[in-house]
Amino acid sequence: MVSPHMKDLGTARSVIRELFEYGKARAAEIGAENVFDFSIGNPSVPAPAAVNETAVRLLTQQPDSIHAYTSAQGAPDARQRFAEALNRRFGTDYTADRFYLTVGAAASLCCVFKGLTCPGDEFVVFAPYFPEYKVFIEGAGAKMTPIPPEVEGFQIDFDAFEQALNEHTKGVVINTPNNPSGVVYSRATLERLANVLTEKSKQYGHPIYLISDEPYREIVYTGVEVPWVPHIYHDTIICYSFSKSLSLPGERIGYVLVPESVTDAADVYASVAGAGRSLGYVNAPSLFQQVTSLCCDLTSDIKIYEENRNLFVSALRDMGYHVVEPGGAFYLFPRSLEPDDLAFSERAKKFDLLMAPGTGFGAPGHVRISYCVQTDTIRRSLPKFKALADTYK
Ligand code: PLP
């Protein structure tokens, strides 16, 4: 006998994974250049040269110690560098002992949900949201409460949000720049969110934590501001990752930051560390603790993502697609040309266009396009998008 829930998770159909596998099979049939796979978010620009140089240098200069265990929460020098980098950038006074290094944002989120959850707790998420939130939140023993999307701009539907809050709300998750919409929450949105959370925390007599999942923090385009959330709401816990900003998704490295301003910060940090211990997530990869902390002021060259966004948004709009302009990340989330996004995604496959249905992100009637691909792939895909749109005329 095995855990039925875990077995379900291990075998459940992921539409995105299926599309990705379908794309690979189709590429073997008709050639990779004829399949337009926009299904998955693997960064398409390489890590900055300094990342590989630093890795090689560390492997050469410290061949033994670089592979050794570090403290469970991460090496003190690496945590110190992360703290100093944020302090330089945001004028904060973070210290190393509030960072817990993890195997990416996924593990950061799992540690935070598990560390915070008491029986009966709920976490609010805003659609469209990263589908794994449900797995992580339920895995921690809490309930996920989704808020329907605000489809005009993918900011927040505050009426729906306020109605969803109750005395069981332990936390609220935001992800800006967002996967799958690419939208960045405006300062006004964040300030209004902070006001609601402050008022409701007072009303319910306990803090409502804001969990800021920000693997795309650095992937933001000309003229768009990504405010530093803890400056706006003091009970913010940061879940960060270098998967996207340094194009290192396979190296599995990120951190949780519990700023001192968080209510009961020492307890929250201890609970995050305890959750990491209970999940077996201690000691994030040693080599990449060092590499990322020595390179954390760098970002992969994101010019190509901006170029891709500009090309895609204007071409799709010209063809009649409705799409909210993303300010960052590398995703577009246009409306599907029929209400049933699963049917639309299936029809797109006939044109070898692979797009993830919005239903999986809690926002039916949309599809996600990952444009972290070569610009030429987008250019060559445009006649296919046109042909797809024509089938609806
Ligand atoms: N959160 C969001 C919104 C993501 O898009 C992803 C990955 O795509 C993650 C978390 C997990 O990132 P990581 O690779 O750092 O675990």
Image: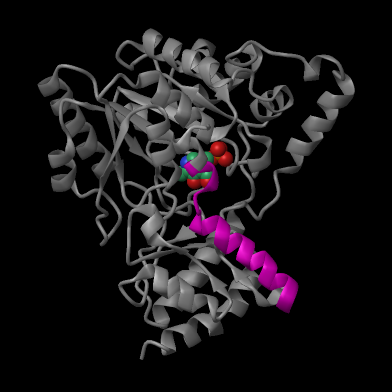
Q: In which quarter of the image is residue 209?
A: top left
Residue 216 visible? The answer is no
**In the rendered picture of this protein, how many numbered marks are placed on residues?**
0
Outermost front residue: 1
Q: Is residue 314 left or right of residue 32?
A: left
Mainly helix, strand or loop, the magenta region?
A: helix
Image location of residue 14, percent across then percent down: 50, 54
Q: Nearer the viewer, residue 264 or 231?
A: 264
Q: Which of 84 and 177 is in front in this view?
A: 177
Q: Is residue 149 left or right of residue 272?
A: left
Image location of residue 274, percent across then percent down: 48, 13
The magenta-colored residue range is 8-30
Tell me if residue 165 comes above or below residue 21 in the rendering. Answer: above
24 inside magenta stretch: yes
Q: Which of 250 and 80 is in front in this view?
A: 250
136 inside magenta stretch: no
Q: Which residue is drawn at 25% across and 24% down?
A: 120
Tell me if residue 106 comes above or below residue 339 in the rendering. Answer: above
Image location of residue 164, percent across then percent down: 17, 39
Color style of the picture: one colour
Image location of residue 265, percent across then percent down: 37, 12
Q: Which of 150 and 228 is in front in this view?
A: 150
Outermost left residue: 203
Tell me if residue 340 comes above or below residue 390 in the rendering. Answer: above
Residue 297 visible? The answer is yes
Q: Which residue is drawn at 36% across and 91% down?
A: 393
Q: Is residue 228 left or right of residue 62?
A: left
Q: Residue at x 42, y 83 (%)?
A: 319
Q: Quadrant of residue 323?
A: bottom left
